[in-house]
Image: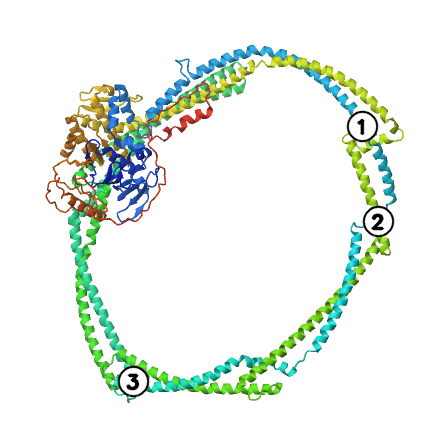
Amino acid sequence: MRITDISVDGFGVWHDLDLRRLSPEVTVFHGWNEAGKTTLMQFLRSVLYGVSDDRRAVYLPPVSGGRPGGSLGVVTDDGPFRINRYADRSDTDCGRVTIDMPEGEQQGDRLLREAIEHVDEATFNNVFALGLDEIQHLGTLGGSAAAQWIYRLTSGLDRIMLYDVIVGLRSSRKKLLDNADNSSKIATLLADKERLEAEIAELAGQTRTWCQRGLEIDEIDQQVATLRAEARERERRARRVEVAMNIRQQWLKRSETDTRIQSLAGLYPLESTAIADLDELNERIEEHQRQREIHKGQRHQLRQEAEDLGINEVLVRNCCRIEGLAEQQEWLESLAAQSAEFEAEADQLAERFESETSRLAQQWFGDSERRLVLTKEQLEKLAPQRTAMDAAEKQLEIAEQEYEVYRNEEEKVAAQLESATTSSERLGLPTNLQDAGEMVAKLRQRLNVEQKIEQTRRSGVELEQQARELLDGQVMPLHHYAAWGACVFGAVVLLFAFAFSQGRPELGQAGFLFLFVSVLVPVWRFFNKERMAEELDGVERQLEDLNRQLVAARTEKDELEEELPVADGSIVLRLQTAEKHLAELEDMLPVESERRRATEASRSAKSAYDSAKARVETTRRDWRGSLKALGLPEALTPKELNLLAGQYEQLAALEQKALSRADDMARRQREFDRVVTRIERLAEETGLVMEDAEPLDQLEHLLSESRLQKAHIEHRDKLRERAKELKAEEARHARTAIGLTRKRDAMFQKAGVEHETAYRKLAADLEERTRLEGERKSLTREIAAAIGNLGSEEEFAEFFTPEVVGTLEKQWEGFTSAHEATEKELDTLLKERAQLAEKQRTLAEDSTLSEKQIELGIVEANLHRAMEAWRERAVASQMLERVRHEYELHRQPETLQEATGYFRELTGGLYTRVWTPLANDILFVDREDGTSLAVESLSRGTREQLFLSVRMALISMFARRGIQLPMILDDVLVNYDERRAAVAAKVLTEFAAEGHQLLVFTCHEHILAIFKKLSADCRRLPSRFGEHFQEEVEEVVEEVIEEPEVEEVAEEEVVEEEVVEEVAEEPEVEEVAEEPEPEPDYYYTATIVPRKKLKPEPAPEPPVEVDYDYDIAPRIEPVEYDWDHDNPDHIERSEIDSQPMEEPMVYTRWG
C-alpha cells in the first residue's frame, strides 16, 4: 500500500489541508516546532486504525473547526481508492470508514483491512514507525541494556518479544525452585511439611483418655435407653386403662344404637330426593292437562276467523297474469315514448343525409348538385398502383438510412485508427507489433525466473530440514540403547539361570531368544546407519544442484533486468500493461481493411439511394393517370382517397340508419297494441272493467285488487298453519301427561307399595335409619379420637367385658406407681453421664491437633500446586527455547544478513557484519579488519545506525511476506553529523527505491537540504502562525508510474491540476516556467497549499456509513509480566493454570 494524497478536514491544529501526489518512495515534510508534524502523523494512524481515546482527548475537537476526520488516497494491488474516516457521531466514536472507488462506488472497510494486510496498530508502531522517542530511549540506556534492546528487535517486534517471555518464565521458575537458594517456594513448603508432621505425632497421645471417657458414656446410654423403654411401656398401659375409663359411656350408647338400626334393616332403599321427585311429577301432570284445554279453545277461534274472509277465486287464479302485465308496465310506457322518438329521429336523419351529400360534392368537385357513386370495386382497381407507390417510398427511406449508417461507420473506423496511434505514443510503449511482442515475452520470462528462484529457495529449505533429520537419525537414541542393554542383560541372566537350574528348557529358550535379539539389534543398526548415510549424501548432492540452479537463475534475472526498460511497479503489473497494449495492437490489424470495406459499402449505398428515388417518381405518375380515368381529382393522394372513401361510407351508413329508425317506430307500435288487448280481456274475465279508462289505469286497478286478494289468502294460510301448530301442541301435552302418570305408577311398583301414602311412609322410615347411622358414626369418631395411637377398638373391647369393666380403676393405680419408680432410677443415671461428658468436653476443647492437621493439608496442597506450576513453566520454557533456536537458526540469519548490508552502507564500510552466536542473547559486529565487537562497546551514534539497520531489515522481511506499508520516520537523523546524515539519507533513498514508501518528518533545514540533493519529494508544512518562508521553487520532475487503471487515474488528476495553477499565482512563489501538460498518471510536485474552496459547494449527499465488522484494538503498551503470585503461601490452582496461557505470548508472531 502506498499513500498518494492526504486530506485533513479537521484534526488538531489542521483544517482543510491537502497534501497531494506524494512520492511512492521518499516524501520529506519539513516544519518548525509546533508546526503540526506530530498531529499529521497521528492523523495518518487515526485514518488507518481509528480514533483512540488518547488521540481524541488531544486532537478532537479540531482547534480551527471543520468536520473531525479526513481521507487518504492510496494505491494497492487492487488499484487506487480513497479512505474516508470521520469521528463525529459521539464522544466515543472511533470513526466510520467509507471507501470511494474511482468509478464512484462506495464500499465498507474490507479494502482498508486488506490494504494494511490485517496488521494491527501495535505492530505498525513497533515495526513501521520509528521516532525520536525511541532514539532518545536508546541513548539513555547503558551499554549492555542498549545491546540487549537491539538484540530483541531480531527476535520479533510485533506485540510481545520472545526474549521477554523466555526471561520471565526462567525467573518465575527459579522463584518456585532454586537449588542455590533454600528460600525458594518449594523448599520452604517442604520444611513446613516436616515440622507439622513432627508436631502431630506428639499430640496424638492425648486422644486415648478421651476414648476411655467415651466408652463409659456409651455404657450409661445403654442403661438409660433400657429404663426409658420400660417407662414408656408402663406409661402406655396406664394410658390405655385411663382411656377405657373415659369412653365407657360412649361405648355402651353405641351398642344400644346398633340394636335400633338392626330393627330397621331390610327396607327398600330410596333416593334422598324420592319425595321431591314425586311432588314434581304431580305438578307436571296437572300443568300439561291445563295447557291441553287452553290450546283446544284457541283452535276453534282460528277456524271461525278464516270463514269470515271473502275471496275472489277468479281473480286469485289470474294473479300471475296480472303480475306479468304489471312487470311490463314500464315497458309499455317506454314503447309509447320510443315510437314518438323514433319518428322524430327518422325525419332528422333524412334531412342530414341530404345536407351531407351536397357538402361532400361541393368539397371534392366544386358542384353541390353532383352525385358521386364510389364503389368498392373501383377502390380495388387502385390498390396495385397504391401498393407500388408505398413500396417505392419505403425502399427510398431504407436506402437513405443504409447510406447514413455506412457513412458514419467509415468516419468511426478512421477515428479509431487515429486514436490507437496517439495512445501508443502517449504511454511510451512500442508502436510496432513485433517490438511489443518481444517485450511481453521478456517480461513473462522475467516472472518465470523469479518464481523459479522462489521455488528453488523453498526446495533448499526442505532439503536442509531433511538433511538434519537424517543426521539426527544416525545417532541411536538413549532409550534404544537402554532397551538393547536390557535385552543383553536379560539374555545373560536367563542363560546363567538355565545353567544352574538343572536343565529347565524354558529358561534356555528364553535366554537364546534374548541373545538373538541382542545380536540382531546392532546388525540392524549398522545397515540402517549405512542407508541413512547414503540418503544424506544424496540430499547434499541435491543441495549443491539447487545452489547451482539458484545462481544460474539469479544471473538470468540480472540479464533480463538489463534488457528490459527501467520502470516502476511490480513485474506483474508491468506484464499486465504490456499484454494489454499488445492485444490492442493486434486488434488494430483488421481496422484498415475494415475502413476500405466501409468506403466501398458507402458508395454502393449512395447508388441504391439514387435508384430508389427514380422509382418513386415513376409510381407517382401511374397513380395520377388511374385517378383521372375514374373521374377523380389527379391531385388526390392515397391518404386523401382513403378519406374520401371513408366519408362516402359514412354517408351511406347515415342513410341506412334513417331507414332503420322508421322500421323501429312501426315495430314498437304493433307491440303496444298487442299488450293493450290482453289487459282489456283480463278485466272482462274478473268483472273489474273501468269505464273510459286508459289501458295503464285499467292495469293499475287490476293490480291493486290482486294485491288485496293475495293479502287475504296469505292471512288465511297463516290461520291454518297456526291451527295446525295448536293441534300438535294439544296432542303433545296429552302424550306427556299420560307418560308422567305411567312413570309415577312405576315408582310405586318398584318400591313395593300400592299408593302414594305407603310410598311416603317408606321414605320416613329410611330417613330415621339414616339418622341412627349418623349418630353411630359420631360415637365411633369420639371413641377413635380418644383411643388415638394407643391401639385399635378390637384391643380395647376386652376392657368392656363384664369381668374386666369393674377393675379398671385398680389397674390404673398399679401402673402409675411402677412408672414413678422407674423415673427416679433414670434421673440418677443421667446425672452420672453428665459428669463424664463434662470431662470429655474439656479434653475435646483442645483443638491443637486438628489445627495442625488442617495446616498440614494446606501446606501439602500448596506444595502440589507449586510443583505443577514449576512443571508447566519448565515445559513452556523448553518449547519457547526450541522456537527461539529454530528462529535464530533459520529466520534470524536472514534478518541479520539484510541488516548487515544496511549497516555496512550506513557506516561507510567500517563495519562489515552483524551476527549473533547461537544460544546467546547478544549481538556482535565485525570491523573492517576482522575483529568482532559487542554492541555495548559501540558508540551512541553507531548504536543508532545499527538500530536503524535492524528496523529496515524487519520491514524488508515483512515486505517479502507480502506486507508493504509506509515507513514513518520522525527526526531519526537528528543526532547524526552532516556526513553521517548524508550517508543515512542516501541509504534511506535507496531503501525506498526497492519498493518501500518512506514519510520523513523533520524540523532541521540541513536534513531537508540533504534530501533535496537526492531528488526526494521535499515539502514544507504551512505555518499556522501566519509566517511565510521564501523558498526557491525547483523545477518539478514528473514521475510516471505504470498502473493498470490509467484512464481512472487521469480523471482524478484533472481537478488537482487546477489547484496547482492557483498556487502559481501567490506572490511568495517565484514564477515557474510553464511545463508541458502532465500525462494522465501519478506525478509529484514540491509545493503544499492549504485547500481552498473555489465556489460554494452544494450540500453533499449523506455518505453511506459502514461500521467496522471487527473491533479496533487499542494501543498496546509494553507488558509487565508478573510471573509470581502476590501471596506465595496461598496459590490457587486456577491462577497457576491461567497465567502462562492467558498471556498474549500465545499470539506472538515470531518472524
Which is more N-terminal, label 3 or label 1?
Answer: 1
Q: What residue did someone put label 2 on? A: 764
Specify the quadrant of the image occupied by residue 887: top left
Mark 3 vs mark 2: give the one in front: 2
785 vs 174, left or right, is: right
Residue 636 visible within the image: yes
Q: Residue at x 29, y 83 (%)?
A: 381
Say few, some or many: other residues with alpha carbon within 10 Å of mark 3 (under 14 / 14 to 19 / 20 or more).
some
Quadrant of the frame with the N terminus: top left
Report helix, strand or loop for mark 2: helix
Say few, some or many: other residues with alpha carbon within 10 Å of mark 2 (under 14 / 14 to 19 / 20 or more).
few
Q: Point out the residue furthest to the front here.
A: 692
771 vs 913, left or right, is: right
Q: What residue did someone put label 1 on? A: 240
Whether 846 is drawn above or below 404: the answer is: above
Q: Position of residue 740 (x, y in %)?
A: 78, 60
At label 2, which amino acid type do we have? Answer: Ala
At label 1, which amino acid type do we have? Answer: Arg
At label 3, which amino acid type do we have? Answer: Arg
The Cα atoms of the two marked residues, 1 and 2, are separated by 41 Å
Specify the quadrant of the image occupied by residue 277: bottom right
Q: Position of residue 605 (x, y in %)?
A: 19, 68
Q: Residue at x 55, y 89 (%)?
A: 692
Report helix, strand or loop for mark 3: helix
